[in-house]
């Protein structure tokens, strides 16, 4: 029901159109599956709208390349070749970010996480992307490597129309408070409970 | 952690490899967002593995074309052109299925749903797809248009290695019981609660 009626019409002086065009800050959290996958699914939609997509993976190893990265980067090349959709950038923290001179020269994940966040703040100021996916960004916040108040301030103050999705377990209450949309993915049943290991195509 | 250790090793006489290669039947349910989006995100991964993807949308209007359909069908054409990834079929119930002679000639949604399920059963027998997404299939089951025992029997007995994802609210207990993987997407906070309407790129 994409054209659904809002449940409440707020007294904020905005028109429906102004309200509709507000950028969204979403959090996907919980112990279940689908937090990142649903975010990358939204990137499909955004790409199709011609949005400039930026993905920033904060935890997954740089050696680990998930299927979504291959496909979204392929869609980014398709954009360059044919003009369809939008451009795609995909950055992984791993041992140093792809934009960094320190690449591979550090094992300091706290410094890497802080550097990643500093770069994202710059991009928010410059409005580099229309959709930013900060994948597993809840962890560096949880571990105190990135200050949650700084994140909330930067997100609340971001200019223009930049949609942001943060994924990961243990999302800080300040993030949930600031978010427009929070979905909790809860595990009801998982094949690993029945002794199965992850498999290609399903887990990555 | 895609290479995670299983929590229990079952006494089922199977090797880890045999267990790993078992096809997955997953259910995405709950009142929150991301049920379908996470399924389409998994289709990205599957496509990247060369899987034959089949999407069957049971409720959304045939007039309504979501971004994921455009992009996944584009990836299907890319497969035809370059051999990358796998083939993609996307079918919508709407007023009659695309394969049906009755297309547009009926408003009998119960008959349409039954016809869709009959076609899916044929495809399961013929192993037409490697990943089948039965989007919003919980509703025709909930409304009694499709018999849940028939669904469970067909899914339990499906040959080969066919992954199946069923999405939608109010999943029948029999489905949850039969599924290997159940995720509940719970709404914690939604912009429509704050009086915003759905917007392009986020809702569709």
Image (tube, coloured by chain):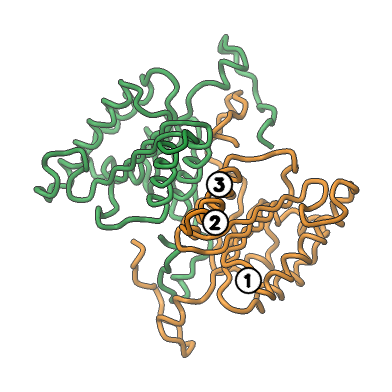
Chain colours: A orange, B green
- Between disc 1 and disc 2, the foreground one is 2
Seen from this angle, which residue lies furthest front? A81
Q: Which of marks 3 and 1 is nearer the N terminus?
A: 3
The picture quadrant where one finds residue B196 is bottom left
Quadrant housing the C terminus of chain A: top right
Q: In this view, does B177 lie above or below A46?
A: above
Q: Mark 3 points at which residue?
A: A74
Q: Residues within 10 Å of mark 1 (few under 14, many from 20)?
A: some
Q: Indicate which disc residue A37 carries.
A: none
Q: How far apart are marks 2 and 3 (CA)?
A: 10 Å
Residue A80 badge: 2
> What chain does mark 3 sit on?
A
Which percent across, then down, holds residue B91?
29, 43
Q: Quick one: label 2 or label 3, which is nearer the N terminus?
A: 3
Q: Are dots 1 and 2 on a single chain?
A: yes
**Residue A55, quarter of the rendered image:** bottom right
Quarter placement of the N terminus of chain A: bottom left
Q: Is residue B36 left or right of residue B9?
A: left
* Residue B16 picture location, percent across and down: 62, 17
Crowd band around label 3 with a 10 angstrom C-alpha radius: few (<14), some (14–19), many (20+): some
Read off the residue under disc 1: A178
- Residue shown at 28% from the left, 50% from the top: B59
């Amino acid at each position: 029901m994409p054209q659904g009626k809002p449940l409440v019409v707020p007294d904020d002086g905005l028109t429906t159109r102004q309200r509709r065009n507000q950028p969204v800050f979403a959090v996907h959290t919980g112990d279940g599956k689908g937090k990142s996958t649903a975010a990358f699914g939204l990137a499909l939609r955004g790409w199709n709208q011609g949005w400039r997509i930026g993905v920033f993976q904060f935890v997954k190893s740089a050696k680990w390349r998930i299927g979504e990265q291959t496909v979204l980067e392929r869609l980014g090349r398709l954009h360059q070749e044919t003009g369809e959709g939008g451009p795609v950038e995909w950055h992984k923290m791993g041992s140093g970010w792809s934009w960094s001179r320190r690449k591979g020269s550090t094992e300091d994940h706290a410094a890497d996480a802080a550097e990643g966040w500093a770069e994202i703040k710059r991009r928010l100021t410059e409005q580099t992307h229309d959709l930013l996916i900060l994948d597993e960004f809840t962890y560096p916040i949880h571990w105190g490597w990135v200050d949650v108040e700084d994140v909330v301030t930067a997100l609340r103050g971001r200019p223009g129309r930049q949609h942001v999705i943060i994924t990961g377990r243990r999302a800080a209450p300040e993030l949930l408070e600031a978010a427009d949309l929070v979905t909790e993915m809860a595990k009801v049943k998982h094949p690993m409970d029945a002794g199965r290991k992850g498999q290609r195509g399903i887990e990555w």
